[in-house]
Amino acid sequence: MTSAIFVGMSKLYPLLMVPGFDPRPWGTKDLSPIYPKHRFETKIGEAWLSGDDCKVANGPLAGKTLAQLSTQCQRDLVGDAARDAGRFPLLLKFLFPHEKLSVQVHPDDEQALRVGQPWGKTECWYVADAKPGAQIGLGLKNGVTVRDLEEAIHQQRAEELLNWINVYAGDMIYVAGGTVHTLGPGSVIVETQQQSDTTYRLYDYGRPRELHLKDGMAAVKEKVKSGRVVRLAPVEVSGGRSRHEPLIAAPYFVVDRFEAKERLRLSTRDDFGRTSVQIVVAVEGCGAIEATGMEAVALAKGDAVVVPACAESFQVRPQWSVEFLRAYVPGKKLPEPETRL
């Protein structure tokens, strides 16, 4: 594979993305600790980093969306592990819940196809920050049926039927398609998911927003493998000055966490020999991403950089130190991760 591909008169390189700040009634005007210098007039719930409509901030391709570049560059951008050559495979975003999110569900692939969607929405949540007492609602309690849930929705007590668990900074939560879930206030989440925005709102605490009970109840699964991911131990790299922590390996995505105090060399090709676009999200510190023959890009807390699959290898060079997540599509379909509630 070539080290870069030309798009018009430009070639691919590590792409710094413009965050897309999305207002939500459960959000906040203060996006600390990720974006301490940003202030907003309306409540922001999400910062989209790699959605189809997210735009490039740097270099000759500035202003292009990931959807446009995926259509034009196909495998050179998304890699050969991605299911669809012409569509960007993963959506990453920050979530800033200041109030409870609606009780909701996303379809799995099978249910999505039934309603004309190309794929479902399985996701995972890395807890970047959490205040004492921060909780999530994840899955139905043992013995609760879909019928029980529907009755509870009409009785305005749906949240009582969920498993509520405390979350702490550093947790990784797996949320399989079909899982009834919600987020409580007090955490900052990095969400990695299939590239889909299909959400069925089941219960919203009386907020004047539309519910999607017909499609939503059809998507609900009583038994799911969602929960807090049982993690592997971190591995020291680069002579012990840096750390690599595997967070989750799942059917649609792999997410790792790195703490780099010196230059790290990474690859867009995985252990199965297939390539994938890499999404790098800085959660602390700053540095730069460099790839041979490509324009380097600076990376600071809150930034996301999309490294095209055709780069083959790239380096993260910290400025003092940088903590970041790396997400990509696995080269073969992996089993669901081991989890606990």
Image (cartoon, helix red, strand yellow):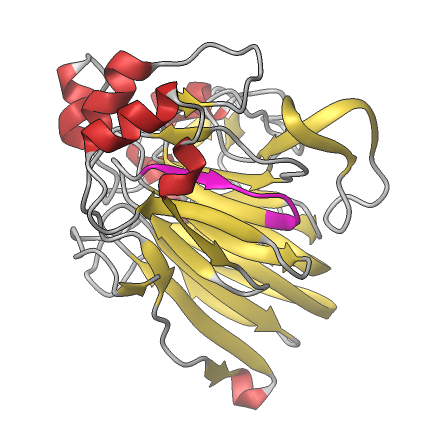
Q: Could you tell me residue 248's position as x and y percent?
A: 35, 61
Q: Does residue 35 lie above or below 75 as drawn?
A: below
Residue 6, percent across and down?
A: 45, 29
Considering only vertical position in the picture, is 40 above or below 298? above
Left or right: where does residue 16 sit relative to residue 193?
A: right
Q: Which residues are magenta?
A: 180-188
**Which image quadrant is residue 144 in?**
top left
Q: In this view of the protein, can residue 333 be seen by the observer?
A: yes
301 with respect to 165 (left or right): right
Which x, y percent locates residue 205? 53, 24
| Residue that sits furthest to the bottom in the current view | 239
**For the point 64% across and 76% down, which residue is it?**
262
Q: Quadrant of the C terminus?
A: bottom left
Which residue is depicted at the point 28% across and 24% down? 150
Q: Residue at (77%, 47%) from the top-left corner? A: 32
Q: Where 115 falls versus 228 (above or below)?
A: above
- Name above or below for residue 97 compared with residue 311: above
